[in-house]
Amino acid sequence: MLNTAAKSEAPGTEQELTDGFHLVIDALKLNGIDTIYNVPGIPITDLGRMAQASGIRVISFRHEQNAGYAAAIAGFLTKKPGVCLTVSAPGFLNGLTALAHATTNCFPMILVSGSSEREIVDLQQGDYEEMDQLAIAKPLCKAAFRVLHAQDIGIGFARAIRAAVSGRPGGVYLDLPAKLFGQVMNADAGQKSLVKVIDAAPAQIPAPASVKRALDVLKGAKKPLIILGKGAAYAQADEAIKNFVEKSGAPFLPMSMAKGLLPDLHPQCAGAARSTVLKDADVVMLIGARLNWLLSHGKGKTWGEAPKKFIQVDIEPKEMDSNVEIAAPVVGDIGSCVSAMLDAMGNSWTAPPADWLNAVKTKRDDNVAKMAPRLMNNNSPMDYHGALGVLRTIIKERPDAILVNEGANTLDLARGVIDMYQPRKRLDVGTWGVMGIGMGSAIAASIETGKPVLCVEGDSAFGFSGMEVETICRYNLPVCVVIFNNDGIYRGTDKNSVNADPATTVFVKGARYDKMMEAFGGVGVNATSPDELKRAVNEAMDSGKPTLINAVIDPAAGSESGRIGNLNPQSVLAKKK
Ligand code: ADP
Ligand code: TPW
Ligand code: MG
């Protein structure tokens, strides 16, 4: 139903009116956008209020970056653009990191920011929060639009939505100058100006010849490997992907956010034999995963000496050959591509050679067995493995819960230790390895899915979005935050040998993050052993109460930059410690 703003006053000319505020809300609702992640202020305070009054869920954050990360992950989880609403210049800039993050990760998101008066901004006359936001946003997103007239709001939102979700998804910026909101127009004309986006992300069917080429390459493999990336998780083609992987018989390796697409305990999962399969495979099929730094660009030591052929399934044609030659590109949406491959495989597909499958299985079972005793230790203070062993069991018992994870050691070790069982249950730092996605992701995950959320956070990582524990308490969300508190970044043991300042990577020793949650009425627990941790997390997950557990980790347990210390540049002048 149309929101009408008012009636015109002049006698004889009485007509229903609408305005920019109402048209924005109507445009969102018409397109099924039912949630906004927001921080209020001039000129969008009333927009948030009116959106809430109209039935849209408006989640107000303490910082736009976190609202933006929430919108970005909402896009990943739902395939609809997550919407973040901010004020002008500083609010816009705070949201911009998340917009760039969404674009980098191929998540559909729309950053909607109010802006100042165009005439004043363009003459640089010093308006309130003056900034040429559109120009600044452009290089950081897929598309950027500004709406100057109320009658263009419908088209503006339609373009933003379509740009965000079609093709390779990404971030879109929509600039709404303050003046727009108060613009009045005839309500009927306003209604007619709205656009319902039909088939926003149309299926992109792969060329049959590309499907045949891919299967020919796969069939010729002696040591095939399938790598599933977060694009495959995003695609929501879970059944088709599972059937395809199983029919192929090939070992599969899930990238971090693709874990659970097929369970990590699936007999074909090569997660625990990662280095072996990357090194030894002769044919590698990438499904919704890029050959970026996370896969060592498809070359070098990680990939071994033996020649390899790559098959790549992706919606973005330009992704092909980005790092190495792709022998069989399959361009299309993953649902269509995987279904087409499945059909073309027929009923007589032969499994890969047994010696390859056995070699992978042996390596995987060895690595799992080596890890097992470390996960059962009950040391106090805890080490990473003792604490993670407990969380791994909790997720096994509650496969429905969503796991949010960030940090360095806390991230890298949790990714390896905690098995996932269902698609889109693991949300983490993404392609850039961003610290700060934690609380925004947790809030959006809870709002969008209604499922319980477990956040496993480094103490540094948590600090980037920690104030949002107030938001978690305010909306009473079933979020349990576990802080791996090792007194710092990577380790809490660095010393400054020159003066009394603390070393650059350490924090206050023995900090009690649990008290932060108590300050807002949530539950805080200090856990010093795996047993205590287990009890506290189970209690939190059972009660659904906002909870923060300060898990005391040995400050000496971690290593520099977790698993990616090799990426640190080295000074030849600095003395090695
Ligand atoms: P990961 O970090 O898990 O390896 P990436 O973010 O590098 O994954 O890669 C995701 C890829 O998935 C991107 O290249 C993107 O174009 C692609 N993608 C996203 N959605 C789809 C889809 N629906 N169909 C096909 N490809 C997709
Ligand atoms: C936005 C650099 C990578 S990991 C990390 C930082 C600051 C924190 C690691 O410490 P934490 O984990 O979280 O306590 P742990 O278990 O190893 O002690 N700014 C941004 N993103 C990144 N990646 C950084 C800085 C970084
Ligand atoms: Mg730490």
Image (cartoon, grey):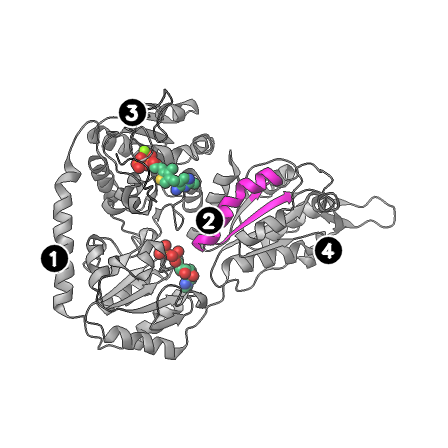
Residue at (32%, 62%) from the top-left corner? Answer: 239
Label 1: how many residues lie within 10 Å, few (<14), some (14-19) or many (20+)?
few
User: Can you identify the residue that label 4 sits on?
Assistant: 188
Q: Amino acid at mark 3?
A: Asn
User: Can you identify the residue that label 1 sits on?
Assistant: 362
* Ligand 1 neighbours mark 4 (CB distance < 8 Å): no
Using the numbered discs, state the Cα–Cα distance from disc 1 to disc 2 in whole angstroms.
38 Å
Q: Position of residue 502 (x, y in %)?
A: 36, 24
User: Can you identify the residue that label 3 sits on?
Assistant: 526
Label 3: how many residues lie within 10 Å, few (<14), some (14-19) or many (20+)?
some
Q: Position of residue 459 (x, y in %)?
A: 35, 32
Q: Amino acid at mark 4?
A: Asp
Dot 4 lies on which element? helix
Mark 1 and mark 2 residues within 8 Å of each other at the beta carbon: no
Residue at (35%, 75%) from the top-left corner? Answer: 211
Mark 1 and mark 3 residues within 8 Å of each other at the beta carbon: no
Using the numbered discs, state the Cα–Cα distance from disc 2 to disc 3 in whole angstroms.
33 Å
Q: Which residues are magenta?
A: 85-114
